[in-house]
Image (tube, rainbow, N blue to C red):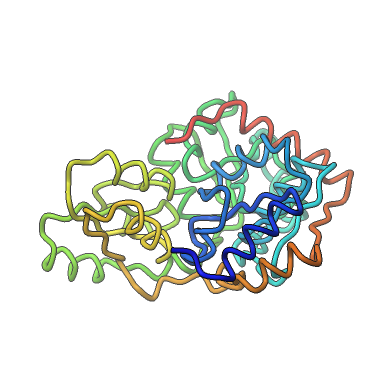
């Protein structure tokens, strides 16, 4: 049952003709008042199809809200807390992409959607964790500059014969770097029949121990479709929150309960209400950068099939 604040937000959405988009890593109470909850690819696709709403409140980190703004230049995109930044996205500024191009002039540049708009504008095409391998295989080039996550780059290298060159060399998600083999061994002993699902931002040795390596959207679909009853989930803890809510008949266990993205948690119900009420913290992307970045996003969407 929704609480009073959640009901107020739902009424405000109607008054403002607004839509709320939320990432799977938002807290459960924010997920419950969102019009759509998804992973990066699903949110990109949803953002590209916004037609009826005048106002979009994006409960995610900065690069996600920027992508929504890039795809909807005529709409007002708001982020409830402007400090909600993705540390990994900030590891790859635009000038680093340009330097890599100079070093590898024959390579195509595939950037994870987890990048800032200025970096997206330097890419040939974008990808997400769910479509990275398919995006790489869609290109003619044999050398691929891939950033900013080195573990996703490693994952793609296992799926492709192309040379995958990570930029920067040590780009990573601090949350997914928390997982270790020891966490897996402990839970495997306690839940021997459990299926282990991990995210491709995890270290290679963690991916090697998994039953499946999937995006958050892929994990959701896997749990729903599987006839198994117990799952260990190796990603941010609030995906577990969603999985438990949507699969009450199954046992969902976090691989590590401390795997929390602090910046994702900056968005609270109070801040979402303020965002709707006062329309604070509009997301602005330079028009020239947005036009260049939009081409990379749209090229990704043209070859994307969620997995």
Q: Position of residue 143 (x, y in %)?
A: 57, 35
Q: How many marks?
A: 0
- Front position in the image: 235 or 99: 235
Q: Which residue occupies 35% across, 67% down?
A: 179
Please tell me in which quadrant of the rendered image residue 186 appears. bottom left
Q: Which residue occupies 62% across, 33% down?
A: 300
**Visible in this render: residue 209?**
no
Q: Position of residue 105 (x, y in %)?
A: 71, 37
Left or right of 275: which side holds 269? left
Q: Position of residue 229 (x, y in %)?
A: 17, 51
**Visible in this render: residue 159?**
yes
Q: Position of residue 227 (x, y in %)?
A: 18, 41
Q: Quadrant of the C terminus?
A: top left
- Front position in the image: 15 or 226: 15
Q: Quadrant of the N terminus?
A: bottom left
Q: Which residue occupies 49% across, 37% down?
A: 131
Q: Which residue occupies 67% across, 34% down?
A: 49
Left or right of 289: which side holds 212? left
Left or right of 180: which side holds 201? right
Q: Give the answer, above or below, for where 138 lies relative to 117.
A: above
- Front position in the image: 171 or 61: 61
């Amino acid at each position: 049952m929704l609480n009073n604040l959640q009901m107020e937000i739902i009424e405000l959405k109607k008054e403002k003709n607004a839509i709320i988009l939320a990432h799977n890593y938002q807290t459960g109470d924010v997920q419950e008042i969102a019009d759509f909850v998804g992973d990066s690819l699903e949110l990109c696709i949803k953002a590209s199809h916004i037609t009826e709403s005048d106002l979009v409140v994006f409960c995610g980190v900065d690069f996600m809200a920027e992508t929504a703004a890039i795809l909807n230049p005529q709409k007002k995109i708001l982020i409830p807390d402007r400090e909600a930044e993705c540390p990994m996205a900030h590891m790859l500024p635009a000038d680093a992409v340009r330097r890599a191009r100079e070093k590898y002039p024959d390579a195509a540049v595939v950037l994870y959607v987890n990048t800032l708009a200025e970096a997206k504008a330097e890419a040939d095409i974008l990808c997400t964790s769910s479509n990275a391998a398919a995006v790489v295989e869609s290109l003619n080039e044999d050398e691929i500059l891939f950033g900013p996550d080195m573990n996703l780059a490693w994952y793609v290298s296992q799926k492709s014969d192309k040379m995958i060159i990570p930029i920067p060399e040590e780009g990573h998600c601090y949350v997914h770097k928390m997982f270790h083999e020891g966490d897996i061994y402990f839970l495997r002993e306690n839940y021997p029949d459990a299926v282990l699902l991990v995210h491709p931002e995890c270290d290679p040795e963690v991916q090697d121990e998994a039953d499946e390596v999937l995006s958050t959207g892929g994990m959701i679909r896997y749990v729903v479709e599987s006839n198994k009853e117990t799952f260990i989930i190796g990603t941010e803890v609030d995906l577990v929150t969603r999985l438990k809510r949507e699969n009450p008949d199954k046992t969902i266990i976090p691989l590590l309960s401390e795997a929390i993205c602090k910046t994702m948690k900056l968005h609270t119900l109070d801040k979402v209400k303020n965002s709707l009420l006062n329309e604070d913290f509009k997301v602005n992307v330079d028009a020239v950068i947005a036009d260049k970045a939009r081409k990379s996003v749209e090229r990704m969407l043209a070859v994307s099939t969620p997995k």
